[in-house]
Amino acid sequence: MTAAQGTVTMGDVARLAGVSKMTVSNVVNNRPGVSEPVRRRVLEVVRESGYRLNVSARTLRSGRTGVLGLAVPHVNSSYFGLLAEHVIEEAARRGFHIAIEQTGAAAEGEFEAIAQSHKLQFDGLILSASGLDPQDQRLVGGGIPMVMLGERDFAASFDHVAMPNEEGTKAATEHLIDRGCRRIAIVTGAVRGEDVNVVTRRHHGYLAALLERGMAADAALLEPLDAMTAEGGRRAAHRLVDSGREVDGVVAVTDGVAQGLLRGFADRGVRVPEDVRLIGFDDIPEAALMVPSLSTVSPDHRWMAAKAIELVAARIDDPERAATEHTAPFTIVARESTR
Amino acid sequence: MTAAQGTVTMGDVARLAGVSKMTVSNVVNNRPGVSEPVRRRVLEVVRESGYRLNVSARTLRSGRTGVLGLAVPHVNSSYFGLLAEHVIEEAARRGFHIAIEQTGAAAEGEFEAIAQSHKLQFDGLILSASGLDPQDQRLVGGGIPMVMLGERDFAASFDHVAMPNEEGTKAATEHLIDRGCRRIAIVTGAVRGEDVNVVTRRHHGYLAALLERGMAADAALLEPLDAMTAEGGRRAAHRLVDSGREVDGVVAVTDGVAQGLLRGFADRGVRVPEDVRLIGFDDIPEAALMVPSLSTVSPDHRWMAAKAIELVAARIDDPERAATEHTAPFTIVARESTR
DNA sequence: ATCCGCAGCTGTATCGATAAAGATGCCGCT
DNA sequence: AGCGGCATCTTTATCGATACAGCTGCGGAT
């Protein structure tokens, strides 16, 4: 074992193997145009010397990092983990690494020149704007290939992999109707007139289902959330029960909110599904483990991850291509909460 | 707006401001030795030109990346999110960025030289080896400052921020005893003789509590898991109930497992806490939302994150310092599952 | 009157890898 | 023999920021 001291550079390997740096580069990067004997010799030296490629030098010269940024509002959410795992795998399949960036975390005390520079470290950016954090806007622009993943709609100039918001919620509502529910509430964020976002789209899906089945939409059956979290859902359940409204089915805007609703109903002694049936959206891993287990709209997360990677990769290759929009397929997963 | 074309370099800024590159570097990096007028002028040019620092060039030259790696077996677990959020925050406080590396994901087709190089991108590494993934071993060594976070014990040559495994589980067991439990089972991974790891340590804590309270340890009360996951816990609950063993309290090795147990008991119509009381370990966010809500050992996660960052930072400054070990403080959070 | 020290700034070599163009040798084909 | 064509390998010129040595002017000590 030599060379414990200092770092072995590509030049060192070249010298030891009796070839040029470029040839070493070609071998290490698995590029064609190197004969078998030379390739073997180089690899041997690489192993013996313990050489490790300097990523910064490569990046500086080539302008490519091989890293895609995955920007999420908060890493501490089940939905994030679900997403990240698939995205990491799909990226690896195409030779990309994923770096996770938490958009919520503002980097203080950094100069703009430095703060902004971090996104230049990425060959592309996947922006999961499932939260409603306006901070995300900071990342928009800056001219790197970008794909929106999930909920939020930005200017149409970005590639977009969308959830089946309307279709999924419509199917969820129909599922409740099929199970015999007649007074179906929807628990969701504030529905503001003009915005076209996850909340309004899912609300539309809900209304569409009622309409199609000839059921009246009742404003009293819209229970707005004070926060799109489990805790917000819990409080919503309390309000729903305490107000004495007659309800036999609930559509929750997300599984996280549904989890809170389940908890809130338990707080009040309301049984699910006996007293009220509940369906969520997302199919987070815990859905199957909740008590009762949660019926939900299950978008194909792997499909979404694969599509997102495909789109960034395509845009990296051709920055001028037209932006496209895609909607994930989904299934309704019926579990105990709607039995 | 000029300079939309190409990238603005530090040299461009220098030229426009009429100073040298080094001065621009000093200004941008907030280093001393620059007069106020010059600093203002440079910052103005930085703003006008839209200059952004090239991180790769800086890294290549300076040898520091300002990035700490956080290696976890899987990003798709509640425990991970809990940890990551705090680690990211604490790192930011000290001017570090965090890059998340999933150790479970083996990068195929990559040459060793490239695969290995990725950890050189980090100034330090925080290894959360809570799973029992041997892949983690790949990351060990390689001479970068490293801290073990959480469960796993490696050679004592690393800094280590440990969970209060023994103390916590002992307190959890005592909590069950205080609540009147007399036949307390422990659901955990396989306890192999020599290994000193999270499983054996927690098991010791459990035994210590029984001993101290004058209760006999019964081998029939050790229910081993086939997997340290929620699904594994669910199956363990089924076995526990189906075997007809008399049990009135259960200590689960993690909250994830406890979640599965809760679900498994529900499957069998066993009520928690009426028929059996249950306590977990970790205090993951869902613990409060489970039905019934889960009592658990709550280690101070923020403290652990802060300590880990502190330790890597110290080791970066002085690679020769002796390794130290620290154990997180904890509290017992009593919720419905032990009411 | 001279020298020293220091704050403030500049000039240049350098970090390690790569793109692009150039050199080399070998083959087959006319 | 001659020559294009190809595969293989080498050379040269960067990429952008930073370390380091060095230059300059100025106030204060000698």
Image (spheres, coloured by chain):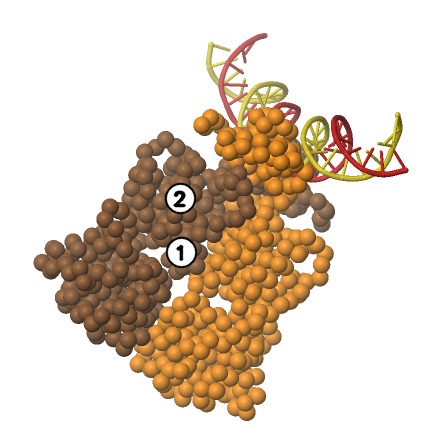
Chain colours: A orange, B brown, C red, D yellow
Q: Which residue is rendered at x = 25% and y = 72% of the image?
A: B242
Q: Nearer the viewer, mark 1 or mark 2?
A: 2
- Based on the displayed image, in which of its 4 quarters is residue A23 positioned? top right
From the viewer's perspective, is residue A100 above or below residue A294?
above
| Image quarter in which the C terminus of chain B is found | bottom left
Q: Nearer the viewer, residue D29 or C28?
A: C28
**Outermost residue, left side:** B214
Which mark identifies residue B137? 2
Q: Residue at x 59, y 53 (%)?
A: A94
- Compute the Cα span from label 1 to label 2: 19 Å
Q: Which residue is mark 1?
A: B80
Which amino acid type corresponds to the residue marked 2 in the rendered image?
A: Gln
Which is more toward the observer, B16 or D28?
B16
Q: Is residue A8 left or right of residue B264?
A: right
Is B12 on the left-hand or right-hand side of B113? right
Task: Using the image as rendered, state which of residue A238 and residue B84 is in the foreground.
Answer: B84
Disc 2 secondary structure class: helix
Question: Residue B202's spot in the image, x, y percent?
Answer: 24, 54
Marks 1, 2 in one chain: yes
Q: Residue at x 51, y 40 (%)?
A: B112
Identified by mark 1, the residue type is Phe
Instruction: Tell me if label 1 and label 2 are in contact, CB under 8 Å.
Output: no
Question: Residue A168, image x and y in percent?
Answer: 54, 76
Q: On what subunit does the disc labeled 1 rest?
A: B
Say which quarter of the image contains residue B286.
Answer: bottom left
Report if residue B319 is visible in the image: yes
Please state the horizontal and vertical placement of residue A38, each as a whole percent of the image.
Answer: 62, 32
Task: Please state the chain letter of the residue tagged with numbered disc 2 in the rendered image.
Answer: B
